Amino acid sequence: MRHGFRHIIGMMAIVWASWVAGCDSSLPSYEESLVVEAWIATDAPLPSIRVSAARATRDPLVSLPAPDDLSLKLTVGDQEVQYARSLEDPLQFQPQSFPQTSAGERFILELDTPGASLNANGILPPPIAAREVSVSFPGDPISVVLVDSLVVGLDSLNLSVSATTGYIYPVQVSISWEDRGYDGWIEARLQPDASFSSSLIDFFLLPSQVFPEDSATLGEDGFKHWEGVYAVPVPEEDSPFPDHSLRIVLTRGDDRFARFLTSRDAPERREPVSNVNGGLGFVGGIAMDSVRVIVSR
């Protein structure tokens, strides 16, 4: 392993509970706005599209269906496809035909109601295919210190009262993919089948990342490479490594795709960055591939 695991010894996962709530004196009214979410994938049938009515921030966290008199169509390349509301889920709209998409095709989504007209557009990126995968982890778990900041005063230097010791196996994963010369972004994500990692521990590791594709390492084999790390907590110092399944997902998109992903969890925002003209939400073109491996001793 290139960087080793021992540098993680002594890291501190800090539990914080300061949730930021926006308290603007004047809130925008979204009563007439619609929220659209669609992920259009290269070399795949057209997806379902989610459309809902936006609600004020003071309202309950319940999604509202879009108006009944709604017209929705998606044009990909020279193929125009009409959408109809799903009978099972009023928030979902289904394509009435299923043409296959191709890299480089431009797509345009158009949505019309008597009170609003929305549109979004983009270009489908080149396909992406996961190549060689390597996984490594230490022979024994390492000790980490977890600190609960809820019981530690801001001016206190005595952390021993609230600190607990735990053990983890850090798992390092390397994956490669073909360089297509695309000036875009990659989201790489490690998804173990069990909820091993917590957001607190992962804060110090790298279970997922959104990055410009040209910043990825280009190996002598001509492939791009990415390395990530996730944690497998265990109860004792001598606990064996738990065998499990791991899904590795690579997603390629443009800069609007990256802005949407990186703004989803921004505490200062009420909603992610939108690329929908006349409404809210995100309509993006992506290429995706995933592999599943068994991680075991």
Image (cartoon, rainbow, N blue to C red):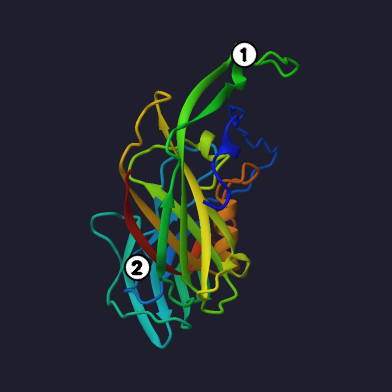
Above-or-below relation of 223 to 32:
below
Judged from this view, the residue extending furthest toward the front is: 139
Specify the amino acid type for callout 1.
Answer: Ser
State the residue at coordinates (69%, 13%). 158
Q: Position of residue 217 (x, y in %)?
A: 59, 66
Residue most toward the top?
A: 161
Residue 133 horizontal/vertical position (percent): 41, 60
Q: Please give the name of the residue rendered at 37% of the width and 79% of the height, measured from the top-left corner.
A: 101
The quarter of the image holding the C terminus is top left
The answer to whether 297 appears left or right of 105 in the picture is left
Residue 203 vs 214, above or below: the answer is: above
Q: Which of 126 and 79 is in front in this view?
A: 126
- So how many labels did they put on this image? 2
Task: Specify the quadrant of the image occupied by residue 151.
Answer: top right
Name of the residue lying farthest toward the right: 155
Residue beneath disc 1: 160
- Image vertical order of residue 184 relative to residue 150, above or below: below
Name the residue tied to disc 2: 47
Mark 2 Cα within 10 Å, few/some/many (few <14, many 20+)?
some
Q: Is 172 rendered above or below residue 131? A: above
28 with respect to 137 (left or right): right
Dot 2 or dot 1, earlier in sequence: 2
Q: Distance between the residues labelled 2 and 1?
A: 52 Å
Give the structural element (helix, strand or loop) at label 1.
loop
Q: Is mark 2 on a helix, strand or loop?
A: loop
Q: Quadrant of residue 68?
A: bottom left
